[in-house]
């Protein structure tokens, strides 16, 4: 095991996207011909980790994949992105997480789709693995978690980080309606999108004004700061020490594929929290907006995430 200290440690999911493009979605029992097939790397945890790594911080991923081709392939993908892989475990008890996606359009991600997700090995990540990675968690500057793994494991990882004064980012995605309030208490930055904010608070969140309200409600539950992302509108930031939240607008760009924009934003936020710990959260959010805005101008998930070399120097 490595004793190196990491800037950003992500405890989360890896998924292989298997994407078929077809003129329409097949009916039950039907076989149709598609015109294109491709494999993509996904999973919110891995996406966020890879975005942080591409901006130039030392990252480690704590996750579980299958002892199979997709697992081997994913480990190589982490290595290619300079993500440390000592804490990427392989199990023979379940397959690497996979999403089988059928898209009914010639342009990927723009038509209707049908998706089956099998979390597989992601659900086998537990306390035992967290204990083995305890040194890396303790020494990290920032720890990031989502909900695509067992929520118990997520909460445990956040608690371990919190107990060791490691700053935490929690992204409650995909959202669950009765989220354990423990999650709020161990989140330094609780970062979600509009639909997650809506599900968690019960408020309807359709605009900036709604987001200000929802942020207040989430903050009351015990986190240190809340960010609600608003797609092309940027985000709203609310810190415990302030009474009012701030709208941090995004610059207008021509979006071609917004898949993974939220993960690009969170990966960038983790980067800033680790690299510029004393920067105001609003400024980190402004810069993360800019990183995510670059990601929506290219096709794919990780394939659209910018590297440091693609971005203006004043973002660093
Ligand atoms: N059309 C856009 N133009 C500019 N920036 C965008 C656009 N869409 C998203 N972003 C940027 O990405 C961030 C995250 O977007 P969003 O709130 O849609 O997250 P999300 O719903 O989790 O994303 P997704 O589910 O598509 O990955 C926004 O806060 C913003 O900075
Ligand atoms: C928010 O993120 C979830 C994934 O967790 C996604 O399914 C949903 O479409 C997103 N909502 C918005 C408004 O972008």
Image (cartoon, rainbow, N blue to C red):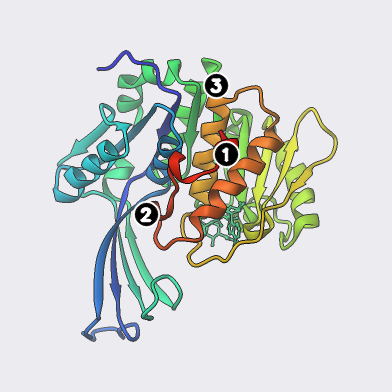
Kindly identify which numbered label has been placed on residue 180.
Answer: 1
From the viewer's perspective, is residue 145 above or below residue 163?
A: below
**Discs 3, 2 touching: Cβ within 8 Å:** no
Residue under the image location 32 percent in, 44 percent down: 122
Element under disc 3: helix
Q: Residue furthest right?
A: 243
Of the pair 134 and 22, the residue shown nearer to us: 22
For the residue carrying disc 1, how many other residues have a C-alpha within 10 Å: few (<14), some (14-19), or many (20+)? few
**Discs 3, 1 touching: Cβ within 8 Å:** no
Q: Position of residue 308 (x, y in %)?
A: 46, 39
Residue under the image location 68 percent in, 33 percent down: 281
Image position of 313 (left or right of 111): right
Q: Earlier in the sequence, mark 3 or mark 1?
A: 3
Q: Position of residue 25 (x, y in %)?
A: 34, 82
From the viewer's perspective, is residue 253 above or below residue 63?
A: below
Residue at which label 3 appears: 162
- Cα distance, mark 3 to mark 1? 16 Å
Of the pair 303 and 163, the residue shown nearer to us: 303
For the residue carrying disc 3, how many other residues have a C-alpha within 10 Å: few (<14), some (14-19), or many (20+)? many
Q: Nearer the viewer, mark 2 or mark 1?
A: 2
Total numbered circles: 3
Q: Name the quadrant containing residue 278.
A: top right
From the viewer's perspective, is residue 170 above or below residue 163?
A: below
Q: Nearer the viewer, mark 3 or mark 2?
A: 2
The quadrant of the picture showing ligand 1 is bottom right
Q: Earlier in the sequence, mark 2 or mark 1?
A: 1
Element under disc 1: loop
Of the pair 5 and 190, the residue shown nearer to us: 5
- Cα distance, mark 3 to mark 2? 32 Å
Image position of 244 (left or right of 233): right
Residue at which label 2 appears: 303
């Amino acid at each position: 095991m490595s004793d190196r200290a990491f800037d950003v440690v992500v405890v989360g999911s890896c998924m292989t996207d298997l994407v078929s493009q077809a003129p329409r979605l097949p009916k039950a029992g039907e076989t149709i011909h598609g015109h294109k097939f491709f494999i993509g790397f996904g999973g919110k945890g891995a996406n966020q980790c890879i975005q942080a790594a591409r901006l130039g911080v030392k990252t480690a991923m704590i996750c579980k994949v299958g002892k199979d081709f997709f697992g081997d392939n994913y480990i190589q993908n982490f290595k290619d992105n300079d993500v440390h892989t000592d804490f990427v475990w392989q199990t023979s008890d379940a397959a690497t997480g996979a999403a089988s996606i059928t898209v009914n359009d010639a342009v990927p991600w723009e038509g209707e789709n049908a998706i089956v997700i099998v979390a597989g090995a992601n659900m086998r990540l537990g306390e035992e693995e967290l204990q083995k990675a305890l040194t890396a968690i303790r020494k990290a500057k920032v720890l990031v978690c989502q909900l695509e793994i067992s929520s118990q494991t997520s909460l445990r990882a956040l608690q371990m980080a919190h107990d060791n004064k490691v700053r935490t980012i929690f992204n409650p995605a995909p959202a669950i309606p009765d989220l354990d309030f423990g999650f709020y208490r161990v989140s330094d930055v609780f970062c979600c999108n509009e639909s997650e904010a809506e599900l968690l608070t019960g408020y309807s969140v359709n605009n900036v004004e709604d987001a200000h309200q929802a942020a207040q409600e989430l903050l009351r539950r015990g986190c240190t700061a809340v960010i609600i992302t608003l797609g092309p509108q940027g985000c709203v930031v609310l810190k415990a020490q302030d009474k009012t939240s701030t709208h941090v607008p995004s610059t207008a760009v021509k979006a071609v594929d917004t898949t993974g924009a939220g993960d690009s934003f969170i990966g960038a936020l983790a980067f800033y929290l680790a690299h510029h710990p004393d920067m105001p959260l609003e400024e980190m959010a402004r810069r993360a907006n800019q990183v995510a805005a670059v990601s929506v101008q290219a096709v794919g998930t990780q394939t659209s995430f910018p590297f440091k070399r693609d971005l203006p120097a004043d973002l660093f």
